[in-house]
Image (tube, grey):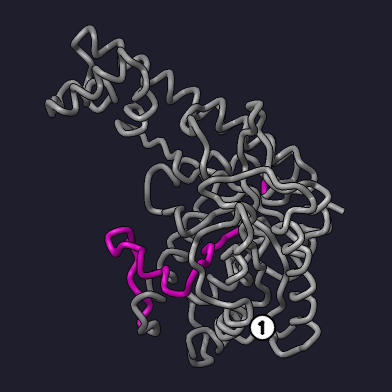
Amino acid sequence: MKFEKNSFNNLEKEKKEWLEDIWLYYKGETHSHSLHSNRLEEDGSKEKMVHSSRRLLSYAEKLGLEFVFFSEHSSDPDSPKKLSENHPICQSLLKQKQEVDEINESEKYKTQAFQAVEVNIMFDENGEAVVDVPDSILSQIDLVIASRHKIDDKLEPEKIKDSLFSAINNPNIHVIGHPYRHIEFYQNDWNYFKKYYQNDEVIGSVLKKLEENQDWDKIKQIIGKIEAKDPKMKEYNLLFNELKKRYWDSWEEVLKKMEEKGKCFEINLSSFNPVKEYYISLLKKASKYKDLKYSITFDFHHLGQLENYKNKDFFSTTPEEIKNPSRAKGVQRILELIKLLKSLNIDPEKIINSSNDNIKKFISSFN
């Protein structure tokens, strides 16, 4: 399949350094949602997608992308339920595969379509970490992304590890979707610590009172921004550091297991901000695992979502050729990420969607 360099935002044919960087790392989208994610079936997603798969494919073709995976939601991410093989959602996933095949056979688009699914990682009624779609269905789908969405006690490091391990150890799952989302633990993260202990009658009430009284000096002692001199704050600072250690120890185990099982770590640009300290720290840890694979995705829900990116989150300047402000934000974010990847020696060969060959090689490694 020919990759048309002048198709990105109608750029002229001469070489653009920033665009060449993007093409090296990102030639297809592995995580996008079409109208099929607007589940009419019972237990389905209630999100409001606005574009058909053909509309998204047409847009991807204009960008010059070689392939797009339609990773539709399974059960409702906000209220996941374990589905049976005969559940209408599971049957819909199999029918969608037929639609994707028909799109490709029509040869209307230069961009190739693939079917995928984004399943929910959840804990069942017995407290066991599972995904919501049975293996008999997952084994028939091109690419399976497993993501944490709605999980009780989501900040508990052991639950983070157990939930991600359940997906990593499943041979029918290829990609761990946005594994860090909603569980970010920054260097001096008062919010994480406060939320973690909010249901503890003693500690939670103390932390709540400190915040209500705006006792920032004691809060800074707890989270290590200043030296803890108050004896009680020293105790809480020890709790803070112990929680942070358990958190990052769990991540080391998760990343090691992902490398061992050949799973892909999804860098989801709808939530992963490559200029923020937490995401830089996490990717630095991941980069130590030399055989770990990555995907770069925008997690498309609708074409206007780039407007949600905040200008203050960008260090780079906008390429002058990009006139549309929303598209400029998308370009800036991926360029910031590529700069970070290069600094960590994560080259394009480690990115599963950096080429048609890489994505096919990655999927075939599970067969």
Which residue: 35% across, 27% down?
193
Residue 210 vs 290, above or below: the answer is above
51 sits left or right of 319 in the view: right
Q: Is residue 304 magenta?
A: yes
Residues 338 and 1: in front is 1
Give the number of callouts. 1
Quarter of the picture containing the N terminus is bottom right
Q: Is residue 20 magenta?
A: no
Can residue 345 be seen at all in this image of the molecule? Answer: no
- Which picture quadrant has residue 213? top left
| Residue 312: percent from left, percent from top | 27, 60
176 sits left or right of 308 in the view: right
Can residue 270 be seen at all in this image of the molecule? Answer: yes
Which residue: 51% across, 90% down?
14
Quarter of the picture containing the C terminus is bottom right
| Residue 346: percent from left, percent from top | 59, 53
* Residue farthest to the right, as pictured: 367
* Residue farthest to the front, as pictured: 42
Which residue: 49% across, 90% down?
10
**Residue under pointer 1:** 3
**Circle 1 SS class:** loop
Residue 9 vs 52, above or below: the answer is below
Residue 80 vs 349, above or below: the answer is above
* Residue farthest to the top, as pictured: 231
Residues 321 and 65: in front is 65
Residues 110 and 166: in front is 166
Residues 125 and 18: in front is 125
Which residue: 56% across, 88% down?
7
Q: Which residues are magenta?
A: 292-320
Q: Amino acid at mark 1?
A: Phe
| Residue 165: percent from left, percent from top | 67, 34
